[in-house]
Amino acid sequence: MTKQRKIMLTLTILYTVIILYFMFFAFGRTGASERADGYTFIFLPDNFFTLPTISDLLHPTLMDIVDFGNTIAFIPFGILIPLLYRITFVRFLTLFFLSIIVLETVQALSFLGSFDINDAIQNSLGAAVGFGAYKLGFRSKNGWRNIIITAISSVFLLAGLWGLCGIVDKALTKEEGPFVAINELMDNSGILSAGIKPNRFTLSGQDVIPRYNMYDVGNEHLKTFTYASKEEMIFFLNYGMPEQTDYAGSIRVSVNGREVLTSSGEDQRLYPELFPAMFKIPVEAGSEIRITVEGNEKIWDVGYRKMKYFWN
């Protein structure tokens, strides 16, 4: 074994030990393992393409550093291993990915972490960047020249991967669309109700002017409105009681029978600074939203924002 090869092998072993330390012992993993009460396995890829943005890195959190480190820390393996052994890209990436899968499994079974397929993919992407940099850099017999070109190639390939991941993340992330007013709600008598004419009123010293719609109990003491969502969306409504009332009333909102909001006139009397209040909640397609209004409670500007991809 040549001296140069011994140096590379030593570097590879030392770097592997460092990575294994961070995978199994850093970040308080040993203490967390004592408190673990079950295995954690994440088999479904969902966010492996999500890397911190430039703005995230200006004020990074620990998770931003971990997410970026999941890729960057494994770039050296893509350089060192092909320097030690003649190996094709496909064979290298396959064996590397399987090795990470084994380590992730040991993490989960030892309670020193979790099995996360997203981590395995990010680690492998980093190794792939390193392999690409090796192929671009080590083309001559000039060692220092090869190292410099490999380092520069790593930066550019990582930047390309970063940009590609940003595009994929953008393409696969749903965003809120424009606001759509719900101007008809099914009331408890099974009739579509357009509510009452929106009118200006005062609430907690503020002048409130509904823009789209307004609903109340009318001549009844209690009224229930329902709406069936046809698509994934963010549901919105505003609520409160106009001034010069005795704060007798309440509102309850449930989604598929699960109560997600409850508020009474007493809440408004005790905490007037919180009113008028706006409520919003993510709702899956096919859900039933039930709004129960009692007494002097009013709701207005009821509507939703459809969750959609930017290209849809």
Image (spheres, rainbow, N blue to C red):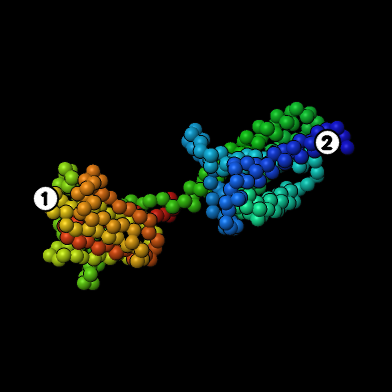
Side of 182 relative to 59 (left or right): left
Image spot of residue 61 (x, y percent): 51, 38
Amino acid marked by disc 1: Gln
Looking at the picture, does residue 284 appear above or below residue 11? below
Query: Residue at the spot x=59%, y=41% of the render?
Result: 27
Quadrant that contains the N terminus: top right
Judge by depth and name the residue closer to the eye, 22 or 309: 22
Which of the two discs, 2 and 1, sits closer to the camera?
1
Residue hosting label 2: 5
| Category of crowding for the residue at label 1, using alpha-carbon neighbours closer than 10 angstroms: few (below 14), some (14–19), many (at least 20) | few
Judged left or right of residue 131, residue 245 is: left
Secondary element at tag 2: helix
Q: Which mark is residue 197?
A: none
Q: Which residue is painted at 49% across and 52% down in the image?
A: 172
Q: Give the CA distance from mark 2 to mark 1.
A: 86 Å
What's the residue type where badge 2 is placed?
Arg
